[in-house]
Image (cartoon, grey):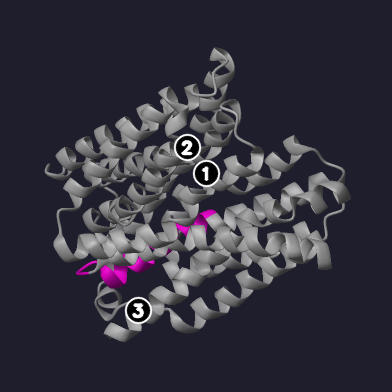
C-alpha cells in the first residue's frame, strides 16, 4: 500500500507536468508561432491567458463534478480535453482557431488541476500530506521548464505546431496512465455512499475560501516578482539577457525548494510558523528591491529560496481541513480564488506601474499582496477553530 500511493503520486505528478508543459508550449515556440500566424505580442499574450481564463468559471463546477461522478473519471475527461485542445491549436491557421484550442485545453487543465489535489489528499491525508502536495506543486515549474528548454529546438527543426502535437500526446499518455494506475483507497471506496450524499456546509465554504485566498495572494506576490523584476532591472541599466537570467533563478530554484520544504515540514512540523516566517521574509525582500533596485539579485535569490517551503503547506490547508465528502468541491472554490486573482491582480500591478511611471511600483504592490497572504492565513486559522454555523 505504501509503495502504491507513491506510484500514484508519480502518475499524478506526470499529469500535472503535462499541464505545465502545455501551458508554456506557446511561449517556447513563440517566435515561430508569431511569424507563421502573423500575430504580435498582444495576441501571444491572449494565447497564454486563454489557458488560465476558464478557471474563473470552470474550477467550481469541475470540483462538483468530481464529487458527483468520481475524481478519476472527471480527471480523465480533463486530460482528454487538453489533448483535443492541443491538437486543435496544432492545426490552427489563424489566431481564432488557436485561441479556441487554448481555451479547450485550459478548461481541461482547470478541471485536472482541481481534481489532482483531491486525489493526492485521498492517499496522503493521514500522513506525509505536505510532502505529497509539495511534490505535486513542483510538477508545474518542471513542465514549464521543459517547454522553455526544448521549445526553441522543436520550433526550429519541426515547426511550432509540432510542439502543440507533443503537448497533446503528453496529455493522452498521462491520461492512459491515470486510467490504468489510479484507484481510490479502500477507506474512501467504503464511504462512497456517504460522499455522494454529502453537502457543502458554510464552514466548508469559508475554509475553502480563506485557504484559496492564501494560495491566490501567495502566487500573485510571486508572479509579480518574476513578471516585473526584468523591467526594474532594465530601468536600472541591466541588459535584457542579464535581467532574464537573474529573474529565472526564482523559477528554477522552486524545483528544489518546494519538495525540500515539504519534507522539512513533515519532519519537524510547525507548518504555520514556517509559512508566516516565509511570507514575512518575502514581503520585506520584495519591498526592499522596489525601493533599492541594486538589491535585485539578492532578492531574487531570497524569493527562490523562501517561496518553496510554504507551497506544499498551503496546498495542504484545504486538503487537510475539508471533509472528505466535499473535498473536491471545496478545492473548486479554492482554485476559483486563485484564477480570479491571477487574472486581475498582475494586470492591476502593471497598471499601477504605468500610472506612477515607476518600474518599482509593481514590486511594492507585490509586497502588499504578500502581506495579504499572511492576513488570509490568520483568518483561515481562526475560522478552522470554529464549528459549523449552519
Q: Residue at x 86, y 48 (%)?
A: 35
Distance, label 2 to label 1, CA atoms, is 8 Å
* Residue at image mark 3: 6
**Do the numbered discs 2 and 1 sit on residues whose CB atoms are within 8 Å?**
yes
Label ID, residue 225: 2
Q: Position of residue 107 (x, y in %)?
A: 59, 53
Q: Which residues are magenta?
A: 110-127
Tag shown at residue 247: 1
Above or below, comparing residue 46 to residue 310 in the picture: above
Q: Regarding mark 3 in the picture, which secondary structure is present there?
A: helix
Magenta highlight on residue 124: yes
Q: Is residue 77 above or below residue 280?
A: below
What x and y, as percent, mark residue 8?
40, 78
Q: Which comes sooner in the sequence, label 1 or label 3?
A: 3
Q: Nearer the viewer, mark 2 or mark 1?
A: 1
Q: Quadrant of the C terminus?
A: top left
Seen from the viewer's position, the closer of residues 279 and 201 is 279
Amino acid at each position: 500500500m505504501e509503495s502504491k500511493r507513491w506510484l500514484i503520486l508519480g502518475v499524478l505528478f506526470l499529469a500535472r507536468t503535462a499541464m505545465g508543459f502545455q501551458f508554456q508550449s506557446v511561449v517556447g515556440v513563440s517566435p515561430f508561432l508569431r511569424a507563421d500566424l502573423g500575430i504580435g505580442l498582444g495576441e501571444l499574450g491572449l494565447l497564454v491567458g486563454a489557458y488560465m481564463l476558464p478557471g474563473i468559471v470552470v474550477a467550481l463546477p469541475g470540483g462538483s463534478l468530481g464529487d458527483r461522478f468520481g475524481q478519476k473519471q472527471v480527471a480523465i475527461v480533463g486530460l482528454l480535453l487538453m489533448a483535443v485542445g492541443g491538437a486543435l491549436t496544432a492545426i490552427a491557421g489563424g489566431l481564432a482557431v488557436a485561441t479556441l484550442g487554448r481555451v479547450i485545453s485550459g478548461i481541461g487543465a482547470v478541471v485536472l488541476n482541481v481534481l489532482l489535489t483531491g486525489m493526492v489528499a485521498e492517499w496522503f491525508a493521514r500522513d506525509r500530506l505536505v510532502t505529497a502536495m509539495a511534490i505535486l506543486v513542483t510538477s508545474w515549474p518542471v513542465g514549464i521548464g521543459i517547454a522553455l528548454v526544448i521549445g526553441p529546438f522543436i520550433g526550429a527543426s519541426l515547426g511550432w505546431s509540432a510542439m502543440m502535437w507533443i503537448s497533446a500526446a503528453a496529455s493522452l499518455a498521462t491520461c492512459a496512465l491515470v486510467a490504468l494506475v489510479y484507484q481510490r483507497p479502500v477507506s474512501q471506496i467504503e464511504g462512497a455512499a456517504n460522499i455522494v450524499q454529502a453537502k457543502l456546509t458554510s464552514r466548508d465554504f469559508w475554509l475553502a475560501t480563506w485557504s484559496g485566498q492564501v494560495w491566490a495572494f501567495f502566487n500573485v506576490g510571486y508572479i509579480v516578482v518574476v513578471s516585473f523584476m526584468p523591467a526594474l532591472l532594465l530601468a536600472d541599466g541591466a541588459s535584457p539577457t542579464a535581467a532574464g537570467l537573474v529573474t529565472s533563478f526564482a523559477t528554477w530554484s522552486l524545483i528544489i525548494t518546494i519538495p525540500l520544504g515539504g519534507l522539512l515540514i513533515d519532519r519537524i512540523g510547525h507548518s504555520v510558523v514556517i509559512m508566516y516566517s516565509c511570507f514575512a521574509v518575502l514581503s520585506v525582500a520584495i519591498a526592499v528591491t522596489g525601493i533599492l533596485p541594486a538589491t535585485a539579485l539578492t532578492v531574487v535569490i531570497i524569493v527562490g529560496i523562501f517561496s518553496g517551503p510554504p507551497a506544499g503547506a498551503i496546498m495542504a490547508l484545504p486538503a487537510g481541513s475539508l471533509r472528505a465528502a466535499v473535498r473536491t468541491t471545496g478545492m473548486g472554490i479554492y482554485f476559483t480564488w486563485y484564477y480570479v486573482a491571477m487574472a486581475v491582480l498582475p494586470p492591476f500591478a502593471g497598471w499601477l506601474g504605468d500610472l506612477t511611471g515607476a518600474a518599482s511600483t509593481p514590486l511594492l504592490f507585490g509586497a502588499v499582496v504578500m502581506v495579504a497572504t499572511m492576513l488570509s492565513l490568520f483568518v483561515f486559522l481562526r475560522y478552522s477553530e470554529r464549528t459549523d454555523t449552519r
